[in-house]
């Protein structure tokens, strides 16, 4: 693929995954050879999906794979500790002994791939060593200190035994995103010997996936501020949490208290309140309260990034919901509870195990179809059904476009009916916006005219919502993306109209970054918007095109200072440099040469580190050819 074909405006969420996979898969090419890669992650789902693919590929290639630290009580039982660790230092020393004993057994094993997960698996292992799953304030502080201590200690010990590591095959070390400098500090020799370091960025919403995530698990979705009544309930539960006087508290109020605390940013307190709800539900013997409390506990854990613990709570909630339905199959409320439980389990699995997620989503869909048939006028159940159709379609999107379109269209039909019933209901209006956009995404290639009609319908709704609440940043970003989607369809058939829409999206992106200059997601959105406008102007107004390309490049360069290992930002820079150079003679030859030389240097660095994808492999040669074609200085 040529460089200029790799437009930064392509909002493809799978790009980050595939680029990361290209780098990690290098470790399997010669499993007997020693190589080190560091991975710094801020996206749990991408982290988990990459590890899963690496493990599955290793299995298919019959490459032994050892993942550490172990997280079960049995596997952690022999840590060499004389008693149960209770301090941060004892925990760090115990987990380090556990890992080193498995990495360097008395009898050296055959070469194998070693996955050292010091990001997601380590907290679970430490909590298991501490013999706790409910972490109170004191234990939370111990675990936080033990996390930092154990990462530092283990990296230091591995650095001391780097010569021994060479006999054991490739080593992959996974760390939190802010551990780049500590890794180099505690393991300087491993750092200098590394094959590469990889940064997994937080997920950037994609044009093809946005905004079809109305029930997404991310905390990034906008939430209404707690109301006075909710704050009053929270205050009562906070007092009860301190005093222990919980006898007369309704468990249902506890769910409100936990969610209110979470909205206010008190993650630990919210989880403690959810755990209190669960204890009261068990003491009072209410199965349904146990089920909802387990789900609430899972929600609070998920907000804090405790994915495995959230999955455990959701799985228990599903089991209780199934038990309730088995007792009263005709109880509609319990049937709906069961469908919600299926959804929550599936939401956790959708990236790491999409096949299992699909099974759970389909089970939820079947329940909601039955409920909607029982009560066609129940708008809540109709909306539930539309959400289920979307969730099934999301999983099928890449494997079965025809089935995807059927499900998205079914969802859209319901949302059109609901919006007709209550045109002033903004939730249903935004649902309708999402429905049109989802259908259009699938029709882009097979029926561009129908795709455009749906995108324009989505844009009209986004405009109306943004007018209603100009300060709602989520709706403003919806509007910006809607303009971009219309423009993407029009850029070949009607460049002038495409430019108008891209400029409208750019204006919103500028406004959002002015509100929050430190929001890196919005900064990259702005970079993409500048590049979109520049691409349309390159022939009609090369001077304006240059200004927009330079603005896009400046943002990329600024972001790259904070994220030097971000591969996406590095490839964005290459593309921007080349596109600016292409504007010659608007760009003087000397400047064009400087941009191409900067692009060539970056491209060669990525090529030497084997970080270019198959489609990008020809970039260094292509840039060199462009340099050679320039007039002599």
Image (tube, grey):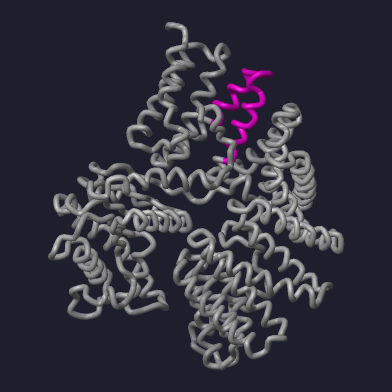
Give coordinates of residue 340: x percent, y percent. 63, 73
**Residue 371 sits above or below residue 182 on the image:** below
Which one is nearer the viewer's eye here, 142 or 208?
208
Residue at the far top: name it: 632
**Residue 269 sits above or below residue 583 on the image:** below
| Location of residue 495 by image quarter | top right
**Residue 314 sits above or below residue 552 on the image:** below
**Residue 266 sits above or below residue 577 on the image:** below
Give coordinates of residue 163: x percent, y percent. 14, 50
Which one is nearer the viewer's eye here, 452 or 579?
452
Left or right: 513, with 428 as reference point: left
> Residue shown at 42%/31% (left/top)?
617
> Residue shown at 56%/88% (left/top)?
281
> Residue shown at 67%/89% (left/top)?
328
Give coordinates of residue 369: x percent, y percent. 73, 71
Residue at the far right: name it: 421
| Location of residue 58 by image quarter | bottom left
| Location of residue 74 by image quarter | bottom left
Q: Is residue 236 visible?
A: no
Number of numbered callouts drawn = 0
- Secondary structure mostly seen in magenta is helix
Residue 472 is inside the magenta segment: no
Residue 543 is inside the magenta segment: yes
Left or right: 61, with 594 as reference point: left
Give coordinates of residue 426: x percent, y percent. 77, 59
Q: Which residues are magenta?
A: 525-552
Q: Quadrant of the C terminus?
A: top left
Q: Is residue 253 visible?
A: yes
């Amino acid at each position: 693929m040529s460089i200029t074909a790799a437009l930064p405006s392509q909002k493809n969420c799978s790009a980050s995954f595939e680029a990361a996979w290209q780098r990690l898969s290098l470790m399997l090419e010669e499993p007997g050879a020693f190589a080190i890669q560091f991975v710094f992650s801020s996206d749990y789902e991408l982290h988990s999906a990459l590890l899963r693919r690496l493990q599955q590929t290793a299995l298919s290639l019959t490459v032994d794979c050892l993942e550490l630290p172990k997280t079960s009580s049995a596997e952690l039982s022999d840590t060499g500790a004389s008693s149960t660790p209770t301090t941060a230092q004892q925990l760090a020393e115990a987990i380090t002994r556990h890992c080193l004993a498995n990495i360097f057994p008395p009898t050296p094993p055959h070469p194998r791939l070693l996955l050292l997960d010091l990001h997601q698996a380590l907290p679970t292992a430490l909590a298991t060593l501490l013999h706790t799953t409910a972490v109170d304030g004191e234990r939370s502080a111990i675990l936080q200190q033990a996390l930092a201590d154990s990462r530092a200690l283990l990296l230091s010990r591995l650095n001391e035994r780097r010569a021994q590591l060479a006999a054991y095959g490739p080593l992959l070390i996974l760390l939190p995103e802010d551990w780049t400098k500590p890794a180099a500090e505690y393991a300087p020799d491993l750092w200098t010997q590394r094959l590469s370091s990889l940064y997994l960025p937080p997920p950037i919403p994609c044009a093809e996936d946005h905004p079809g995530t109305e029930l997404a698990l991310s905390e990034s979705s906008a939430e209404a501020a707690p109301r006075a009544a909710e704050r009053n309930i929270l205050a009562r539960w906070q007092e009860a949490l301190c005093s222990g006087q919980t006898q007369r508290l309704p468990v249902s109020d506890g769910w409100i208290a936990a969610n209110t605390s979470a909205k206010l940013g008190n993650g630990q307190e919210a989880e403690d309140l959810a755990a209190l709800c669960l204890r009261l539900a068990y003491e009072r013997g209410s199965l349904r309260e146990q089920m909802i409390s387990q789900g609430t506990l899972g929600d609070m854990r998920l907000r804090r990034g405790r994915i495995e613990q959230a999955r455990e709570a959701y799985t228990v909630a599903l089991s209780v919901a199934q038990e309730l339905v088995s007792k009263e199959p005709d109880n509609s409320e319990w049937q709906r509870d069961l469908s919600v439980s299926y959804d929550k389990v599936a939401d956790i699995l959708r990236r790491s195990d999409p096949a299992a997620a699909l099974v759970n989503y389909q089970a939820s869909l079947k329940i909601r179809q039955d409920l909607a048939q029982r009560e066609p006028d129940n708008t809540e159940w109709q909306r539930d059904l539309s959400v289920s159709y979307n969730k099934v379609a999301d999983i099928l999107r890449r494997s079965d476009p025809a089935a995807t379109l059927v499900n998205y269209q079914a969802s859209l039909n319901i949302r059109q009916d609901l919006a007709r019933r209550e045109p002033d209901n903004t939730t249903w209006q935004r649902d309708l916006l999402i429905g049109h956009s989802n259908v259009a995404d699938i029709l882009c290639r097979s029926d561009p005219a129908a795709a455009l009609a749906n995108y324009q319908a989505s844009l009209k709704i986004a405009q109306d919502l943004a007018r209603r609440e100009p300060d709602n940043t989520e709706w403003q970003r919806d509007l910006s993306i809607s303009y971009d989607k219309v423009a993407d369809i029009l850029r070949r058939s009607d460049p002038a109209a495409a430019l108008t829409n891209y400029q409208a999206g750019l204006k919103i992106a500028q406004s959002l970054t002015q509100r929050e200059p430190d929001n890196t997601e919005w900064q990259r959105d702005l970079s993409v918007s500048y590049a979109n406008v520049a691409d349309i102007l390159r022939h009609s107004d090369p001077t304006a095109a240059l200004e927009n390309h330079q603005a896009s490049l400046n943002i990329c360069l600024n972001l790259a200072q904070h994220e030097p290992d971000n591969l996406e930002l590095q490839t964005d820079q290459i593309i921007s440099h080349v596109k600016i150079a292409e504007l010659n003679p608007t760009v003087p030859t000397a400047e064009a040469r400087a941009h191409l030389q900067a692009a060539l240097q970056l491209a060669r660095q990525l090529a030497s580190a084997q970080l270019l994808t198959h489609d990008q492999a020809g970039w260094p040669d292509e840039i060199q050819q462009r340099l050679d074609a320039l007039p002599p200085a």
